[in-house]
Amino acid sequence: MGFVWTCPYCNSKTTIKGDNLRISKYDMTLNNADGIKQFTTKWIICPNDECNKFTLTAFLHNLVESSVIGYYEQKELLNTWNLIPGSYARVYPNYIPEALIKDYQEACLIRDLSPKASATLSRRCIQGIIRDFWKITKSRLIDEISELEDKIDSLTWKAIDAVRKVGNIGAHMEKDIDLIIEVDPKEAELLINLIELLFEEWYIKKRERELKLKSIVKIAQNKTDQKKGKTS
């Protein structure tokens, strides 16, 4: 058995099995103020021969003593660190505006360190995409998204509006300053996933379509030129 994994270097989607995976665990059972912990490292080697790069991720869990003397049980995950590469931002072609790529990369970089700030950057990136791709520019993001509603499918529109709402948590202080609404890393990751989806569907697929159509036009033009050459 393996698990589906996408390489952050070459974007290949593959299944990782034992030959490409190494997991090491270290139980820190010395007495301390925070309790016993387990530190885990996970190495993954990309099976794509043209890539073959590795990723290294670390995890910290709580441990508790089990009913069997000398053994411990892994409990809740306390923290995750993407060590290599430092971020799981995908590599995108340079025809996507640099400002959008930078916001996306930074949102990925701080996803675990500050999910709320990551959500705010995702919100900013979505606004940039709307302005660049759809040429909609208003003074407020909510007005830009409202104008976008009849141009895209309803589910995508709802997801974009959801990014606005979650991003607002980081961008604006609540009226009641004692009210703290958190954004967790998984939620921040979902917002990043939407950006990746929009990059793929709006920029990359459009570019691929243009290239295919241009190649068809070029074939027809070449045939026309050949015909003219024979009759001249």
Image (cartoon, rainbow, N blue to C red):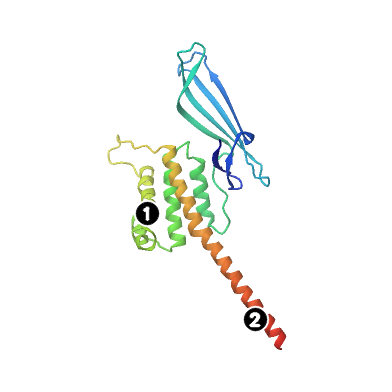
Residue 41 placement (x, y as % from top left): 57, 29
**Viewed as shown, does residue 216 lie left or right of 143?**
right
Marks 1 and 2 close (CB-CB < 8 Å): no
Q: Residue at x 46, y 28 (%)?
A: 77
Upstream in sequence: badge 1 or badge 2: 1
Binning the other alpha carbons within 10 Å of mark 2 as few (below 14), some (14 to 19) or many (20 upward) gives few
Q: Which residue is drawn at the image coordinates 41% and 41% (left, top)?
A: 187
Q: Give coordinates of residue 207: x percent, y percent.
A: 55, 62
Element type at marker 2? helix
Amino acid type, residue under disc 2 in the picture: Thr
- Toward the top, the furthest residue is 69
Residue nearest the viewer, comparing 205 with 189: 205
Vertical order, 31 against 135 (above or below): above
According to the picture, the residue beneath numbered tag 1 turns out to be: 155
Where does residue 179 sit, x and y in percent of width and height? 30, 36
Distance (Cα) linking label 1 and label 2:
45 Å
Q: How many marks?
A: 2
Viewed as shown, does residue 77 lie left or right of 56? left
Instruction: Determine which of the numbered discs, if any, sits on residue 206 in the image.
Output: none
Indicate which disc residue 224 carries: 2
Residue at the bottom extreme of this rendering: 232
Instruction: Report the residue that reaches farthest toward the front.
Output: 1
Residue 40 location, quadrant: top right
